[in-house]
């Protein structure tokens, strides 16, 4: 686990396979995503490294309800009664009223691809095959700032999942892009802004909702922080995909 403060109070935590974000304002913390089930202790350790604890987390925001983003959250939420928020469609996904996630069969079909098998073994060790739900998740409106540390603005970014929601932190100039736009992944040999391999996506969405956002730092669900505007990142993806 590595923690990098990319803007005042905004910390990117890089777990062994997925990222989460801690936004600190005084004692209070907004947690965005929370790793695989096997990352639960690391999420707690990341809070401790900033001198905070689970009791300081006033809300957990979810970009999308895949097991690598909510698995480590579930025990914290259950134990400490932390409210979980995301866009209205993704809230239903988090409550597991439906499931849009690549399963073992999708991974097996793609295991011939370089790096996919090694990634799948590591992911399985982190609990990728466990069933996780966040039954208390509430849906919030898109485009309106939330009264939480960082004043995060949920941005509808459907594609990777139907209800995928990115978060803009306007004061810090940071965009938390989840998995619609990443900067690296164990199954990819590319560095820099890119989309995940298509088999991870429920549908290929448009990156247009990101392009107009005012930010200078991108914090993706996978890969390192990237410095530049969302528009520049989207341009790089388009160029790469030709
Ligand atoms: Zn992910």
Image: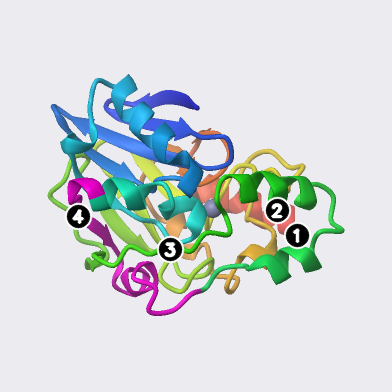
Magenta residues span: 79-99
Q: State the separation of the CA atoms marked 2 and 4.
A: 39 Å
Position of residue 188 relative to residue 42, above or below, is: below
Pair 3/4: label in front: 4
Residue 231 on image: x %, y %: 50, 50
Position of residue 75 relative to residue 41, above or below, is: below
| Residue position for label 1 | 242
| Residue position for label 4 | 83
Q: What residue appears at the point 62 percent right and 55 percent down from the top-left corner?
A: 195
Q: Which secondary structure, mark 3?
A: helix
For label 1, being within 8 Å of ligand 1 is answered no
- Of the 4 image quadrants, the one containing the C terminus is bottom right
Of callouts 2 and 4, the N-terminal one: 4
Q: Which mark is residue 111?
A: none
Tell me, yes or no, whether the two marked residues, 2 and 1, touch with CB atoms within 8 Å. yes
| Residue position for label 2 | 239
Q: Which secondary structure, mark 2?
A: helix
Residue 188 on image: x %, y %: 73, 47
Tell me, yes or no, whether the two marked residues, 2 and 3, touch with CB atoms within 8 Å. no
| Residue position for label 3 | 209
Pair 2/4: label in front: 4
């Amino acid at each position: 686990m590595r923690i990098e403060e990319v803007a005042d109070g905004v910390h990117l935590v890089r777990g062994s396979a997925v990222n989460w974000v801690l936004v600190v304002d005084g004692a209070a913390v907004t947690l965005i995503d929370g790793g695989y089930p096997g990352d639960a202790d690391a999420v707690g350790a990341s809070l401790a490294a900033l001198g905070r604890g689970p009791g300081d987390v006033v809300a957990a925001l979810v970009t999308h309800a895949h097991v690598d983003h909510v698995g480590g959250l579930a025990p914290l939420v259950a134990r400490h009664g932390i409210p979980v928020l995301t866009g209205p469609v993704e809230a239903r996904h988090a409550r597991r009223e439906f499931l849009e996630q690549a399963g073992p069969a999708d991974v097996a079909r793609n295991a011939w691809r370089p790096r996919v098998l090694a990634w799948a073994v590591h992911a399985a060790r982190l609990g990728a095959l466990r069933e996780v739900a966040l039954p208390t998740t509430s849906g919030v409106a898109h485009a309106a700032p939330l009264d939480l540390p960082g004043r995060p603005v949920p941005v509808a970014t459907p594609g990777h999942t139907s209800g995928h929601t990115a978060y803009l932190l306007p004061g810090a100039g940071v965009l938390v892009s989840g998995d619609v736009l990443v900067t690296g992944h164990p199954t990819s040999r590319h560095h820099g802004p890119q989309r995940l391999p298509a088999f991870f996506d429920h549908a290929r969405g448009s990156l247009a909702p990101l392009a107009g956002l005012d930010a200078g730092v991108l914090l993706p669900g996978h890969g390192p922080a990237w410095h530049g505007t969302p528009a520049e990142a989207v341009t790089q993806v388009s160029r790469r995909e030709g």
